[in-house]
Image (tube, coloured by chain):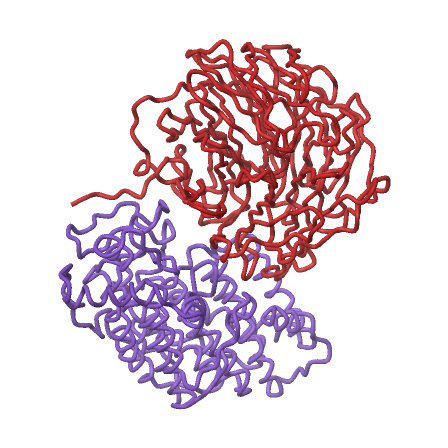
Amino acid sequence: MRLLLALTVIATPALADEPAVPRFAAETEAAGLAHSFTGDWEFMVGGGVAAFDCSGDGLPDLAFTGGTSYSTLWRNDSAKGGALRFTRVQSGIEGAGAAGIWPLDFDDDGITDLAILRVGENLLMRGLGDCRFERANEALGFDGGDGWSTAFAATWEPGQSLPTLAIGNYIDRTQDAFPWGSCTDNWLHRPAGAGYAPRLPLTPSFCALSLLFTDWNASGRPALRVSNDREYYKGGQEQLWHLEPGKPPRLYTEAEGWQRLRIWGMGIASRDLDADGYPEFFLTSMADNKLQKLQPPGEGPVLPRYADIAFSLGAHAQRPYTGGDVRPSTAWHVQFEDVNNDTRADLFIAKGNVSAMPDFAMDDPNNLLLQRADGSFAEAGDKAGVASMQPARGGAVVDLNGDGWLDIVAVNRNVPSEIWRNLGTDAPGNWIAIAPEQPAPNRHAVNGWVELRTEAGLQRREITLGGCHASGQMVPHHFGLGAADRAEVRVIWPDGHAGDWQTLDAGRIWTLPKQGVAAAATP
Amino acid sequence: MRHFLAILCLVIAGAGWPVQAQDRGADGAEVLTTWHRLVLELVRHTPTYSPPVASRAFGYVGVTAWELVAGLSGGRSLSGQLNGLDMPPPAAQLDIDPVLAMHGAMAASVQYFFGNTGPTGQRAMQAMTDKTAARLAAELPPEVAARSLAHGAAVAAHIIEWSQGDGGALVENMGFPMEYLPKSGPEFWVPTSTIVQQQAPLLPAWGKNRPFAMPMGNACPLPPPPAYSEEAGSAFRTEAQEVYDTSRSLTDEQKLIARFWSDDPMLSPTPPGHWVSILLDEMERADWPVDRRARALARLGKAGADAFIGCWHTKFEYDLVRPVTYIRRVIDPGWQPILITPPFPEYPSGHSTQSGAAAGILTALFGENHSFDDATHEADGLPVRHFTSFAAAAEEAAISRLYGGIHFRAAIDRGLAQGACIATHANRLETLE
């Protein structure tokens, strides 16, 4: 007789080789950060933060959406390696109605711009430097529409100077009394000349809450992954769109290997966890989350067939692991990053009840799942000090004070956002951060790959712009190195060209140009 | 969209409706139908509402409607006929508007039985409650409107109180036990998914609940399934081979049938809701008056709820292994059925029992060879299917589980028979004086 316990512990693999747990300090108030994403039904989703350097000091500043409150921008005044410190500045993004925010450099001028998705008109905001922004919709011929926009992704198609933008839209907000089945079209904004062509509807659309352009099959041609909220669609499922230059987007079909999956899709994160050349995808949902691994391709084309390995690796994050509430969780922002610098990507998941959903946990702590050497994950949110019970939505895992330990931001709904400073571990935890740079267009090599080798093995991450939940980061790409004091690094550029391996010292941010040698850019 | 439009019309239409109660019978039918359309959506969007839990709600909401009608029109109450329902409903007072009373009863009943739906469902229920009440009460004296709503709510409260002792009122962890001790042996059910909750079976004690019309959960027992065996040529292996072989040669029509009757929880109104949807459409097509609709919804609701109690009683009596487990163990380790295997024992098939019961009820209401179109999943992109009888639809629903790879033949055939037996108990109840 076997006793099956419907507890997360049943799926926890061997406990040997437990990863080092980083210590986080809650520094929201001490840092002077005071921002809340607020709102009722129309802001039950969304609540984002963009992390990027607009002040030019090398540290990421933070721009938050506010829902019914104003969006705010906070300049990062933290001392390197010291306590976090933020100062609110007027930036030009202030205004209500914003749900999601992503940094990107759409004009390739080296100054980060912003895409702000709203309940109402979406905005492209051109960066002017010194954390100032101006509206660019008209200048770019960008039609911001009037939807309930919730998801964003961008990529550069061959031959285009501007990025192709995908925008995910949610419910028809005029159908507030009976919204089921009223999902509105997602949009594809493709460049035309110096601006944008009229947007294309991505029909059918099923209430997208996260989008990601990804080179999922290592073909060099990114496709658009869409995660949809089954609460509101009818006849829907998760989606993958072909995006071929000059052709209308079209869905992958079952005949092409696409497998029907219906979840409360809320966020997408990707990372090539096993360095097999193909990214794994983490999809947040309610109750069990999904960690998808591409099935080993056989002869012929790579098919989009995935196995869900979340359960076997202990990454399902199905219910609270602390606090006593045993109801299933609700997961939103998700991000793979190595928070303990042990060379293995870990997983941060922002959790929080939608809004008085009695079947789901109200005390729903964020997850910090640390990857073990065998590829499984160990929950450490409570031990690390980031197990907030506040109702989180968006987030960011970035190095806010330049010390090489990744800090965490969580955007909470109707209560203040939170930040935690990573104080590190007692284990060896060297690091390196890589900022690829190529001539325009696509200066930051979106949908290229960064590869890194140490004695611990190969690490790979695709450079993506989108995904998560309502949030994005545009910062150098961080890798933990463990005890290694240097690493071999190369970039596979979006055009497929693989750069030379370069040996770089740990503890620095490196700019890697497509032509030439790397340059240290540590602040 | 079809359902939505019906609800929208009810909500925004209004000015100029007749105010005399005796002229408003059609309004009562519309109120009753529209609330049930909303219930179909709430079932889909309330995570706790697995098929057994949904069937219970349909049962109590239906009985509420009938008790309201019976009290106002002189029909025979089900008090004394249904298990444990011994209290007469509140007596009707003078000057009650029956349409508004129906609205009051439905609003109170639905808000109670779907109290744990999410924020969107709560908004929808409140909008329906407020806008419909405002419209229906617009030309009534305020005291009549208030009295009518209160009378409906009192009838609902009466049924709610009765419901609380049936064993199914409290569903925790979406119906999955926090601990479960499975039986040891290859013939017994084991988890078939990698979803955490589903490492224990859904609602193992549901068969012990108090039924509505049948005397007890095992009132329609089944013989044991074929004896477990892995021997070639054994009855059990032969049934498994049939599932396997069928899955490898499915026609497009068989795939469509499997998906049409899949009726997955949280993605559809579930199997009992599917049959309620059929009934709502047929009553609309026949333009039945409110009393006839309430009687039919109560009868189908009771039978559907009893079907899940009876079926679950049998499921956990035999605790049989699912095809996906057996076939991967014995025939083909890489086998993949086209439907997701539900997280509970195999024998009998819940949809077969449910459909057998529903066909028994609807055949009694509409006749043996009543042809109809089933548009339940039109909004989900599945085509309308035509059936020549309710029995034919039930048979297709049952065999769909074999096409889907989630049930053996015995569970299907005997499930239909069990459902037919359960329907006789509900059909036996008296609703006419």
Compared with B180, A51 (above or below) is: above
Q: Position of residue A418 (x, y in %)?
A: 58, 27
Going by the picture, which residue comes out furthest to the right?
A: A139
Give the side of residue A27 with respect to residue B73, left or right: right
Compared with A307, B370 (above or below) is: below
**Tint applied to chain A in the drawing:** red
Q: Report whether residue B105 is seen.
A: no
Q: Report whether residue B65 is seen.
A: yes
Q: Nearer the viewer, residue A239 or B59?
A: A239
Residue A99, picture quadrant:
top right
Going by the picture, which residue comes out furthest to the front?
A: A299
Residue A268, picture quadrant:
top right
Q: Position of residue A82 (x, y in %)?
A: 59, 10
Compared with B130, A324 (above or below) is: above
Q: Quadrant of the N terminus of chain A?
A: top left
Q: Residue at x 66, y 41 (%)?
A: A152
Q: Residue at x 20, y 50 (%)?
A: B182
Q: Position of residue A139 (x, y in %)?
A: 86, 39
Compared with B278, A484 (above or below) is: above
**Tint applied to chain B in the drawing:** purple
Q: Quadrant of the C terminus of chain A?
A: top right
| Tally of marks | 0
Give the side of residue A222 with respect to residue B343, left or right: right
Q: Nearer the viewer, residue A494 or A213?
A: A494
Q: Nearer the viewer, residue B86 or A100?
A: A100
